[in-house]
Image: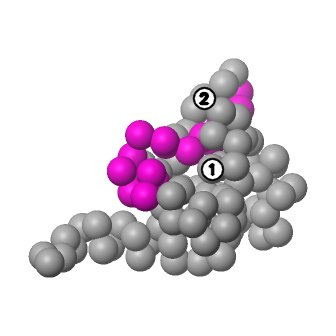
Amino acid sequence: MERHRDIDDDVEQGLGGAGKLKILRLLLQSPNHAFTRYEIGKTVPNDAVSIRNDLQTLVALNWVTALREHHLLKYVINREHEVVKRLAAFFRAVRYL
């Protein structure tokens, strides 16, 4: 089976820490809700800077979409992304969701 280096890099970047996993789990559990960083911070036990950096990484990978709502930036899972679909299926299979 041929490896795809860009997909390898995306998965390693996107799953490179517990904070990102917890953010992904939160967003996948409520896929129709757009979360502020504050809301995410109440659920994900991490400092604000780490949450901001993790969200920037997930947005850059297009796994999470940032929405501007008035003066707030909100985040929602990108359910159309192929990697996100497979991660969601995997998380369900191992009961992480």
Left or right, 90 with respect to 9, comes to right
Where is residue 42, by image quadrant? bottom right
Which residue type does callout 1 highlight? Answer: Leu
Q: Residue furthest front?
A: 93
Residue 82 forms part of the magenta stretch: yes
- Residue beneath the point at 57% across and 66% down: 93
- Residue beneath the point at 52% across and 77% down: 16
Q: Tell whether label 1 touches label 2 (CB within 8 Å).
A: no
Q: Secondary structure at mark 1?
A: helix
Assign the C terminus to one quadrant of the image.
Answer: bottom right
Which residue type does callout 2 highlight? Answer: Arg
Residue 31 forms part of the magenta stretch: no
Q: Residue furthest right?
A: 42
| Residue at which label 1 appears | 28
- Residue 33, percent from left and from top: 70, 35
44 and 86: which one is in front?
86
Give the spatial CA distance, label 2 vs label 1: 20 Å
Q: Callout 1: 10 Å neighbours few (<14), some, many (20+)?
A: many
Q: Range of the magenta residues?
A: 71-86
Q: Nearer the viewer, mark 2 or mark 1?
A: 1
Q: In this orientation, does residue 84 appear? A: yes
Left or right, 97 with respect to 38, comes to left
| Residue at which label 2 appears | 68
- Residue beneath the point at 71% across and 54% down: 26
